[in-house]
Amino acid sequence: MTQPESLSQLLNGRRAAVDATVPAVGFVVGWLATGQSIWAGAAVAVVCAIAISIWRLRRGEKPRAVLIGLLAVCVAALIALRTGRAEDFFLIQLLSNAASALAWAVSIVIRWPLLGLIVGAVLGQKTRWRRDPALLRSYSLASWFWVLQYLIRLAVFLPLYAAGQVVALGVARIALTWPLVAACLAVSWWVIRRTLPAGHPGLRHPQTDARPTEVSQEK
């Protein structure tokens, strides 16, 4: 398989990890520094999210994706303010991880693995990869590790959330974001490389017809 990029390079997992952790850390720091004021924690988290959004927009990233991230932080802050429970700032994360685990599992079962959809979109292939049985199988196998990462987060976050451990939730948010995403990307890439047959031209060149030799020579 002649594929230069890794999944980490294609999907830019580090960027998503920064977006997910900085506002959460800001909330915990603001909450602690002001004697456990949810208002202060929420304000710091929103300011961090706005700063990240401005930075992303200046780098030319899509406004829609940037605004979705900012909106998620604002909603998380409003939930905590509404309930008066600092741990509820992390409620959206709990729900999103549960929903993500379910969505990834269902996508594999119905043979539309989300990893393939994401990578296909990044590479501009749309759904052409689905017509390659080898790629479809590899994406499906690799997608199970994404299901696992969401389940790991839930297994850690749920007890901490139930116990109201705000600081521990912040620490877990850091520990289980970029390190876990990096591990998931690395393992997924290893699975894809191990399961694609010898001579397959790689992610950029789905074999969608009966002429694998011609396809493999296209660069």
Image (cartoon, rainbow, N blue to C red):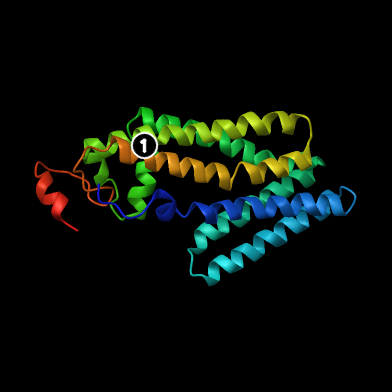
Q: Nearer the viewer, residue 198 or 38?
A: 198
Position of residue 112 measured from the top left corner of the image (x, y, whole percent): 34, 36
Residue 174 located left or right of residue 66:
right
The residue beneath circle 1 is: 191
Position of residue 73 measured from the top left corner of the image (x, y, whole percent): 66, 52
The amino acid pointed to by label 1 is: Val
Residue located farthest toward the right when viewing the structure as drawn: 35
Above/below status of 65 relative to 157: below
Q: Nearer the viewer, residue 215 or 69?
A: 215
Residue 124 located left or right of residue 158:
left
Residue at 30 percent across and 56 percent down: it is 124
Q: Which corner quadrant of the image does residue 159 belong to?
A: top right
Residue located farthest toward the bottom when viewing the structure as drawn: 58
Q: Nearer the viewer, residue 93 or 135?
A: 135
Above/below status of 167 relative to 39: above
Residue at 29 percent across and 35 percent down: it is 195
Label 1 environment density (alpha carbons within 10 Å; few <14, some 14–19, many ≥20):
some
Residue at 39 percent across and 36 percent down: it is 142
